[in-house]
Image (spheres, helix red, strand yellow):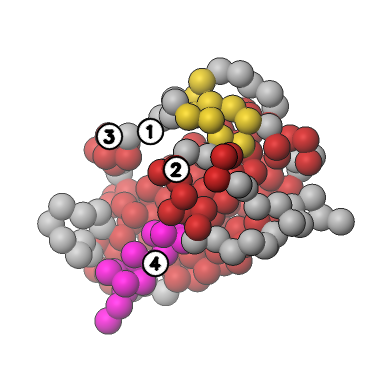
Amino acid sequence: MEIWENEYPTATEYAHFYSTYVGLIEKMNIIHVLNKQMHEVFTLMNSVSGDKAYFKYAPDKWTLKEVLGHMIETERLFSYRAFAISRGDKASLPGMDQDEYMEGNNYNNRSLANLSNEYFAVRVATIHLLSSLTKEMISRKGTASGTEVTVRALAFIIAGHDKHHLNVIKEKYLSD
């Protein structure tokens, strides 16, 4: 039986502020969810043409390229957390201020195809990491951003974060 079958985090496995992301994901094999999302994001981003990649739906919002870049860097961070905690790391892992991270980016200077390829590579690495874990490893709990979280919850947070941004992209960036 696949290690991720019938694995869904309980509310005690993550901070309340992640419940929105976890709640977006069905109770199913998270590896299948992540794989399906990977293809959906890659296909969607490669269908965007022209200046739509630079579109902001409001002056204080990110461009589509920046949203994709944010999705990439956030997945890297959460995947690292899952890796460290799965290995029994007891260190308190740092948080991430998305606005500070965005200030130092160069996403608008890169092609959307390049960003899509990076997204795909990061997601493939995440899937390989999560697929390699044992039941014991996915149940391990550590501290990140000052709160306790399990590896199992991090897998669903990764998928939920992407689902949230996919919904925003479809509604606000590509709705016409």
Q: Which residues are magenta?
A: 162-176
13 to 66, vertically: above or below: above
Q: Tell me which residue sits at (79%, 50%) in the image.
A: 3
User: Residue 118, which numbered label?
Assistant: none
Within 10 angstroms of label 2, few (less than 14), some, or many (20 or more) residues? few
Residue drawn where x is 43% and y is 54% of the image: 20
Say which element carries label 1.
loop
Residue lying at 34% horizontally and 64% vertically, measured from the top left: 168
Among the two numbered marks 4 and 2 on one chain, the one whose residue lies closer to the N terminus: 2
Disc nearer the start of the sequence (2/1): 2
Pointer 2 residue:
16
Q: Please state which amino acid type lies under the numbered disc 1.
A: Met
User: Mark 3 is on which residue type?
Assistant: Glu
**Which residue carries the number 3 mark?**
100
Compare marks 3 and 2 and give the one earlier in the sequence. Answer: 2
Which callout, 3 or 2, points to the residue nearer the camera?
2
- Position of the N terminus, as image quadrant, is bottom right
According to the image, label 1 marks what residue?
96
Q: Where, quadrant-wise, is the C terminus in this rendering?
A: bottom left
Q: Residue at x 65, y 56 (%)?
A: 30
Residue type of the residue flagged with mark 2: His
Secondary structure under badge 3?
Answer: helix
CA gap, disc 3 to disc 2? 23 Å
Q: CA distance from mark 3 to mark 1?
A: 8 Å
**Does 113 appear in magenta?**
no
* 46 to 64, vertically: above or below: below
